[in-house]
Image: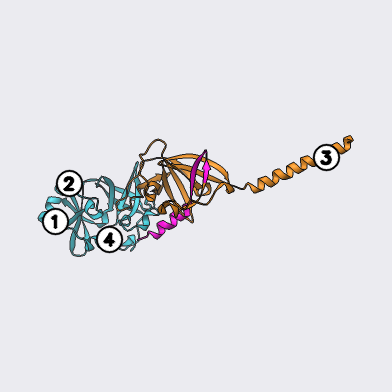
Chain colours: A cyan, B orange
Amino acid sequence: MTNDETTGGGALPPEMDLLMFTAAGLKMAVDTFGVDCIMSSEEAQQLGVSFSTLNEIFGFGKEGSRAEKTVLLYKTGNEARGISVDGLDAIMTVPTGAIQPLPWPLSNFAGPRLFWGIVQRGSDLVLLIDLYRLNVLKSCNAVTTA
Amino acid sequence: MDDRRRNDLIIEELRRRKRKEATVDVEAESLKIVIFRLGDGLYAFPGADVKEILPFTDMSPVPGAPDFIPGVINNRGDIESVISLNKYLGLPDSNRTAASRIAMASKAGVRSGVLVDAVVDVADVPLDSIKPPLSTLDPAIKELVTGEMMYNGRTVVMLDIGRLFEKLVVHDE
């Protein structure tokens, strides 16, 4: 798997628009190219959309209510899937060259590999979620609201 | 004994002593080590494997990482992992204090930060002062130990950063 798959199969552009958000208390982002739409968790539940929180995906343990969260829907064939986040932050345009891969030895472990890179924003390090890998993981271990 | 004979003897003795000193210098081959503290114990890495020692800085945790990798840091623009040796070796976790340090270690083409409770000293020690490790060491630590030495009356356990890194490759999932 390459990051090209996350960005639609083309070569990486010189810049990327990243949708920044907070989830599980951490700063994260996804490539806006991979996000279909944004809705509330209530709307997602009404539409029967399967979504997970990052706590559920990474096994952080039980977290608070899944309500009043924001759900990012992303492209996965004909099926809509989503991840819920605590709050949206901003859309940031970053030079692709400013994105660093996950450092060794973290890159050896399957869990962290759901993040394809890290970018610095002020004093924060922002983890870039690989929606392709996330989808593969969720296919194996889907959590639905149904 | 005339003056000439006496001078010859003195010169000869001085030369002998100098040769002896030179011999001692060669015999006392030394190794630079970084001595650090984990909990109550003293440990050391070869100095050649430690590129720099950073003050403790807040780490950004990465979900899904093993518990002995508490996070990543930004080291002058480079994102680096940090390994908690306490956690990896199964030692009690320590509170972060002003003395906590992150040793940036590099070996065999890979590098990572290693979190320690304090750096005690950077010293040159004679190689022959490093003795084989005790067989009673905990197995988790023993695999990484290359020897033991005394420092200010306390035992210092010499660790091989290369073995630690090799084991992390073995952990590859």
Q: Which residue is mark 2?
A: A64
**Chain letter of disc 3 in the image:** B
* Residue B65 picture location, percent across and down: 32, 52
Q: Amino acid at mark 4?
A: Tyr
Please tell me which of labels 1 and 4 falls first in the chain. 4
Q: Amino acid at mark 1?
A: Thr
**CA gap, disc 1 to disc 2?**
15 Å
* Residue B141 picture location, percent across and down: 43, 51
Which residues fall within the magenta stretch?
B149-173
Q: Which residue is mark 4?
A: A132
Marks 3,2: beta carbons within 8 A: no
**CA gap, disc 1 to disc 4?**
21 Å
**CA gap, disc 4 to disc 2?**
26 Å
* Residue B81 picture location, percent across and down: 39, 49
Q: Nearer the viewer, residue A62 or A130?
A: A62
* Residue A86 picture location, percent across and down: 21, 46
Q: Which residue is mark 3?
A: B9
Question: Which numbered disc covers residue A145?
Answer: 1
Mark 2, secondary structure of its residue: loop
Farthest-out residue, left: A46
Q: Are marks 3 and 2 on the same chain?
A: no
Please tell me which of labels 4 and 2 falls first in the chain. 2
Mark 1, secondary structure of its residue: loop
Mark 3, secondary structure of its residue: helix
